[in-house]
Image (cartoon, helix red, strand yellow):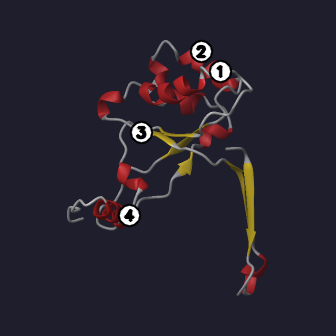
Amino acid sequence: FGNYSLSARCAAGCQGDNATAAVTLLNLTFGDVFICAGQSNMQLMLEYTFERNASIERVRRGSYDNIRLFYGPMNFDYATNQTDVWVINADQAGDPVQSFNKLSTGGWRSPRNLIDPIPDGHNTPPWYLSTEFSRFYATCWYTFEALTDAMLAAGTTPPPF
């Protein structure tokens, strides 16, 4: 857990314009990642609920700063095990209302209900990753090779991928 940064620069074999290139990643958090996804019958968006205003007010006060919203791609290619890049929700950098209003209510309640019982300022709850889509491919999180290895190690014959 925590809020860390990571800096890296080329240390060997550096050539041309990239010889002095460096990159710094900010606001890194290590810990458990919870994913909330659902089915098409979970598409009740937060903006259509009675709890919307209270939730948005708490978001603006910073009560849920550890809940990070990402757009997950919905075009997973099973033949190549490839997907588009995941991107941070642009609205989260500014006014969070539009981002949170589009969350499925079930998706929002899961992290909220984990965080609410913990007193403010106590211990930072686990980092939570959510998407605005009501359906999601779990296969975006593993490779077929890793799944095959795990199934073989468990004594199970994997299906042909």
Compare marks 2 and 3 and give the one earlier in the sequence.
2
Seen at 75% across and 74% down, the residue is 21
Compare marks 1 and 3 and give the one earlier in the sequence.
1
- Contact between marks 1 and 3 (CB within 8 A): the answer is no
Compare marks 1 and 4 and give the one earlier in the sequence.
1
Q: Which residue is mark 2?
A: 54
Q: CA distance from mark 2 to mark 3?
A: 22 Å
- Contact between marks 1 and 2 (CB within 8 A): the answer is yes
Q: Which residue is mark 4?
A: 146
Q: Which residue is mark 1?
A: 58
The spot of residue 86 in percent (x, y) is 51, 53
The spot of residue 51 in percent (x, y) is 52, 14
Compare marks 4 and 2 and give the one earlier in the sequence.
2
- Residue 89 lies in what quarter of the image? top right
Q: Amino acid at mark 1?
A: Arg
Q: CA distance from mark 1 to mark 3?
A: 22 Å
Q: CA distance from mark 1 to mark 4?
A: 40 Å
Q: CA distance from mark 4 to mark 3?
A: 25 Å
Q: Which residue is mark 3?
A: 133
